[in-house]
Amino acid sequence: MALNLEIALKHLRSRVRQSVVAVLGVATGVGFSVAMAALMQGSLLDFQQKLIDASPHVLIKDEYRDPPLQPAERAFAGAVALDGLKPKEELRGIKRAKSLIAGLDTVPGLSAAPLLEGQVVIRFGGKDVAATLSGIDPERHIRVSQLADDMSTGTVTNLYAAANGVIAGDGLARKLGARIGNLLIVSSPAGVVLRMKLVGLFHTGVVAIDDARAYALLKKAQVLQDRPNVINRVRIAVPDIHQARGLARRLEERIGYLTESWDEANEDILNALQVRNVIMYVVVGAILLVAGFGIFNIVSTITYEKAHDIAILKSLGFRESDVRSIFVTEGLATGVGGSVLGWGLGFTLCKILESIEFNAKWAIEMEGLPIYYDPLQYGIATAIAVTSAGVAAFLPARRAARLNPVDIIRGAA
């Protein structure tokens, strides 16, 4: 085996320029694979973490996944069709909410908080901005959200300090041109108008939330929406976010109300990010495939040029497997050498990308490129590169091993 390796390395040294080009091709593929994987995984995890921080782990709504059937439809299923039916006017909200929250409080590790969410129009200085106002119980809400950590000015408990206090996203306050202490005129679709004092600002990094959400005490929101003692949301925090979907399904089966986990609510965005990752791996795989063709070219050339040497080796007793292993070793050595150089290139590219600073807003705010360093990325890129090199070298190696030494020697003579 040592002799086979020595012969393989000697063959590579005999064609230094081509060998270097092949190694650099593999290194480029591995380096860019590592850098792109670190960038894509980092952006996915960063986006996911901001979604988790800003969104409830589990949210119970006063809605149903499938609308309830009308009495006539239930009585004559499939035999009647209703058209132009006027729905019954009723006060929407989660029924028996207190008992539901009390039951959730008994589950170890779970925290639940009631909310009343509704659309409002906030006016300040002649500007009208539509927003979502969430009525909360501050003490409960800080246990199920990151609102306390997201406060950029003031605290959540400032809601208790003012008669009609309100906390707004910094983007919403910027749209209004309002500052802490300003009085805002808040009106709801129910026709109720309140003058509310801005007592705090928060910043989550999720643009849709920072630009269009505000918080007030639950009782104040109920007055504003003209829905006394009513809630339409229950926000739940779980110890393990990966168990949120299973918990949401069990709760929906038990209580009937639409219950969504954080990943179900943002499924479209997460799927789009996964598709982006697949595209990235396909592009990087194509780079490694091109590098594999370079290795195939080198080994094929060496096989052709070393035909006389192959005849001598087989005349000296080398078996077909020995000859095949020599040329496969050449391909694998190129793949391994390129992979090692690719590690350094990939790490360097990651550091360069990480140092880039910018301020961009999409669904979330980004001040730089999030990079995720994971040894598994290096392992996957190396495995693909070495496998490609081995396969690229095997085909000409098999042809070399089948050469008949007698024919080669006669041809040379």
Image: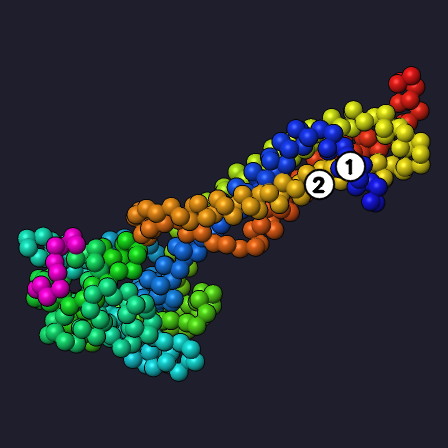
What range of the chain is rendered magenta? 174-183
Type of the residue with mark 1: Ala
Q: Quadrant of residue 232?
A: bottom left
Quadrant position of the C terminus in the picture: top right
Q: Residue at position x 38%, y 66% from top?
A: 57
Type of the residue with mark 2: Ala
Mark 1 vs 2: CB contact within 8 A: yes
Q: Closer to the camera, 98 or 34? A: 34
Q: Residue at position x 38%, y 71% from top?
A: 237
Residue under numbered circle 2: 333
Q: Is residue 108 left or right of residue 15?
A: left
Residue 31, position as x, y percentages in the image = 55, 42
Answer few, some or many: residues within 10 Å of disc 1's Cα (few below 14, many 20 plus, some between 14 and 19): many
- 245 above or below 352? below
274 drawn magenta: no
Quadrant position of the N terminus in the picture: top right
Residue pushed farthest left? 126
182 drawn magenta: yes
Colouring convention used in this rendered image of the protein: rainbow
Q: Is residue 397 visible?
A: yes
Q: Is residue 10 left or right of residue 214?
A: right
- 92 above or below 36? below
Residue under numbered circle 1: 8
